Image (spheres, rainbow, N blue to C red):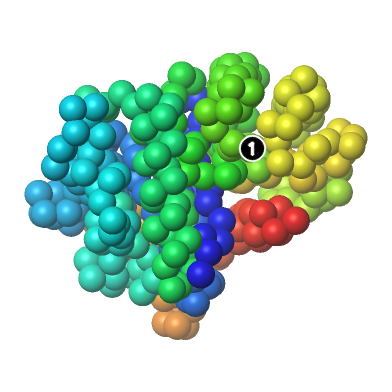
Amino acid sequence: MPLQSSHVFASHIGHTGKTTLAYQMSSYYASKHPDVMVLIMDLAEEGDLTKRLLGGVDAAAEKVESLFGGVFRLLQAAETRPSGLTSWLWSSKFEVMEHAVKLKDHNPALPENLYLISSGAYPRQEPDMSDEVRTSVVARIRKSLDESPTTWKLFCDTDGDRRPSPYTLLAYGLCDQAIVPLHLNKGDLDRTETMLGVMNEYRQRGVIQTQVLFIVWNFVKVQKDEPMDYRGMPIPFTPTKVCMDILESCNARLYRNAQELPGLFVHTPASQVDFIKCSTAVLRVLADNVLKPSEELGLPVAEMEARISESGKKTMKFQSGDISYDTKGETISNVMDGLKQLEEKFEAMSLS
């Protein structure tokens, strides 16, 4: 069966929501599609996504030695050639899944069909790769997934860098489309323009084929929990007026970027309204008493919602070490509504 689709979460700097979205969307996608095998490649240096998937920082600390560093094993198998190419690149048989971890075996809160290859959870010196070597690595990994008897979906998480690191470039090579989260402000957009320009440069050189599926305006402040329509795009909440003003300004500027970088975005903008609807998304600032326990306990929001629904209770307590989080079902639902709409847009835009 073929590799169904591949998406990289990429951004210009850290703390824009890449890892949070990679964690929540991959988990939710896997739970919605039990017939698809979902592979996550954590290519970020500190392995924050890996820690969340393995049950949170405290739980993951016990598993670092045995499980982390899958990407190193994948890319740095016993070298037999003076060029530095690893032996598996030239072997007659190669299986990506020999290097993957079935997450359900280590975190019961995750779906059965979710697998992880991790780059590790410690600072490292990333080996440089020539374009030729990286192309070979990408081809071997994708071929392994394409020739699998099951259907695969690939997600990659990356570090924040305007000039992509070797592993970020590897993720670009592996993934056809990018999801780019950023803060809703002009400063972040200004820095993102640099990243988009670099991506376009690599595309023009034929180094990558990655296109931007959509921009996620993240951490948007809420005026009220009522859905609204923004230029034909439904938003599951009503942002504050200042956020709406900034959104309008940033989207106009982003539309101009898309016009100046033809082919970089998946959907060619016929108009600004069409571009906003197809190539942007808006996500509310997520409540701490939902997001924090979700990440600290390795408990995706989708699973939190399922548990409180099954319990029939209106509130639920989540214990993370010596910290206790009391969370209302309504608060969990508000967070999940945003993630659901983002996932639905992701699927609709990917298929179209």
**In the foreground, 352 or 27:** 352
Coordinates of residue 26 in the picture (x, y in percent): 46, 58
Within 10 Å of the Cα at label 1, are there few (<14), some (14-19), or many (20+) other Cα atoms?
many
Disc 1 secondary structure class:
strand
**In the foreground, 286 or 114:** 114
**In the foreground, 340 or 333:** 340
Residue at 71 percent across and 53 percent down: it is: 349
Q: Is residue 271 visible?
A: yes
Coordinates of residue 196 in the picture (x, y in percent): 61, 24
**Quadrant position of residue 279:** top right
Residue at 90 percent across and 35 percent down: it is: 271
Q: Is residue 305 visible?
A: no
Residue at 53 percent across and 64 percent down: it is: 2
**Quadrant position of residue 15:** top left
Q: How many marks?
A: 1
- Relative placement, left or right, of 251 versus 283 is right
Badge 1 is on which residue?
212
Outermost residue, right side: 271
Residue at 65 percent across and 43 percent down: it is: 213
**Quadrant position of residue 109:** bottom left
Could you tell me the amino acid type at mark 1? Val
* Residue 210 versus residue 13 in the image, above or below: below
For the C terminus, the quadrant is: bottom right
Coordinates of residue 229 in the picture (x, y in percent): 82, 50
